[in-house]
Image: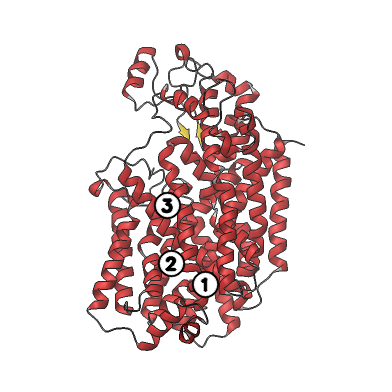
Amino acid sequence: MDQYMLNLLVVGASFALYIGIAIWARAGSTSEFYAAGRGVNPVMNGMATAADWMSAASFISMAGLIAFVGYNNSSFLMGWTGGYVLMALLLAPYLRKFGKFTVPEFIGDRFYSTSARVVGVICLLVISITYVIGQMTGAGVAFSRFLEVESWQGLFIASGVVFMYAVLGGMKGITYTQVAQYCVLIVAYTIPAVFISLQLTGNPIPGLGLFSTHTESGLPLLTKLDQVVTELGFNQYTAATSPLNMALFTLSLMIGTAGLPHVIIRFFTVPKVADARWSAGWALVFIALLYLTAPAVGAMARLNITEQMWPNGGVNGDAVTVQQIETEETYQWMENWVQTGLLRFEDKNGDGMIQYYNDGNAEMQALAAQRGWEGNELVTFNRDILVLANPEIANLPPWVIALIAAGGLAAALSTAAGLLLAISSAISHDLIKGTFNPEISEKSELLWARVSMAGAIVLATYLGLNPPGFAAQVVALAFGLAAATLFPVLMMGIFSKRVNSAGAIAGMLVGLLVTLAYLFTYLGILFIPGTNLLENTAVNHLFGISPLAFGPIGAVLNFATAFIVSSMTEEPPQEVQDLVESVRIPRGASAAAADH
């Protein structure tokens, strides 16, 4: 069986599983569609949350960004993981105790205002639509390679699959589908990493292999990697730059994570408040399995690619030849990815070799002029392909390549489904039922929920055709928006009895508008195909703050505005203040205190 048929078999089997689960767990009521009937086991909910959380950005794009930027992009790991801890400790149990279906519903009830609920919906839609672009982009990348189609065709296929199981099953179907998707993606991510770690270091545990000795050279793996990339004019892999941006970006990802609506709603699906805490703990365990492996995957892939492009370490300017790429099995992966349009090379000076070096480095420019090179001849390398191409680069068995195809698609589709559900719930439950037509029947509301999700899929597909960056970069924009809008209002809603509806509305609007203004100002028009968000240094950012790191600034402005406006206006009604206090205090605690 050839690779293409094996890919079809494995990916097709996984899709049949997802759709079968959706049919089996089809939502028959709004409670099942929005919150799976609040009957999900904490361990299963933890696994589903991990799948919802570990998106295309985590599976497909994060290791690629780490591989090509190095230590600086460890911010993704630290920010996303730390943010999940914040969510588990500060938000999840309290929101579950409040007992609502959606984040805007909590905002509307806590701040006793339909207007606050509508503003919450607007913030949710901006965040979720931005986030889902990255998922659809990642799914399109995976489909394009493994089904041997153009990336835009892959995007349409991904949209069709999500439509079939997300619209049908709602939260109930999505939950059990995500459990299956987690099993697929974690196995798919781990097995190739184990193989590659054994190849390069002899250590079967990738996280330990990263700090082990490179078998061939006898040097520590990271030392060897620093050596090969600096010889080509790139920065040291382990070097760090701009502590301010790194700290702010990490913080943006942390508090943005804690404000992500599609993850928060997962904690509404369990029977009890205690189950929400256990779900968070289990999810962190399941997430750690991938996140402890990703740095090793990125570093080892970068070493493999660099050594393949410069087989003899660049001595005398030698590089891989066009003939080798076209005839040798080792380089078949390049030919495969060239067909997708996501990888491209060009022999600019006609010497038969494909030079790969940093043509922005002054020393390499001088060397290039001396040797007659005319620029880096690996002219396109979309970093989102790295994890998916990794088994091919390392010449792993065909079944491993097919497995990682299924894993990448599982990661992208699981998060896309969660985001689309959040969008659908906001429109049908918060706008239509909560604002415009409170008397709508449950049957009609369920119909609107499905129609809303279908519309969201169409919009996500359209925007996914021209994303503003790599999957993880687009996702980072969504985190910044969540940090500046929903995280502050949720924190104030739980922990402050003084913040009122006027303050909450003003805070959310200031956080949203200032953050969007900064993004548009320093990224130009946001949706420009090919914009590289992490490396866009051509503009002079305000105080040197990257747009991706602006989330905490927006959050501070949100908090400040809310408290200032609240202090100048009436206190919330007493029943709302009592409600806030009851949400924070464990059941029975007040009675126990009275006994003493």
Dot 3 crowding, Cα within 10 Å, few <14, some 14–19, many 20+: many
| Rendered location of residue 566, percent (x, y) | 27, 77
Which residue sits at x=28%, y=40%?
538
Disc number lying in front (3 or 1): 3
Mark yes or no: residue 340 visible.
Answer: no
Q: Which residue is under mark 1?
A: 425
Which residue sits at x=52%, y=72%?
425
Q: Viewer-proximal residue, 438 or 67?
A: 67
Q: Which residue is under mark 3?
A: 476
Q: Residue furthest right?
A: 1
**Label 2 sits on what residue type?**
Leu
Q: Quadrant of residue 397?
A: top right
Mark yes or no: residue 303 visible.
Answer: yes
**Label 1 sits on what residue type?**
Ser
Q: Quadrant of residue 194?
A: top right
3D distance between C-alphas at marks 3 and 1: 23 Å
| Rendered location of residue 176, percent (x, y) | 66, 63
| Rendered location of residue 385, percent (x, y) | 54, 39
**Label 3 sits on what residue type?**
Ala
Q: Which residue is under mark 2?
A: 124
Instruction: Relative to 15, say whether 142 is above or below.
Output: above
3D distance between C-alphas at marks 3 and 2: 15 Å
3D distance between C-alphas at marks 2 and 1: 10 Å
As helix, strand or loop, the secondary structure at mark 1 comes to: helix
As helix, strand or loop, the secondary structure at mark 2 comes to: helix
Residue contact between numbered discs 3 and 2, judged by CB atoms under 8 Å: no
Residue contact between numbered discs 2 and 1, judged by CB atoms under 8 Å: no
Dot 1 crowding, Cα within 10 Å, few <14, some 14–19, many 20+: many
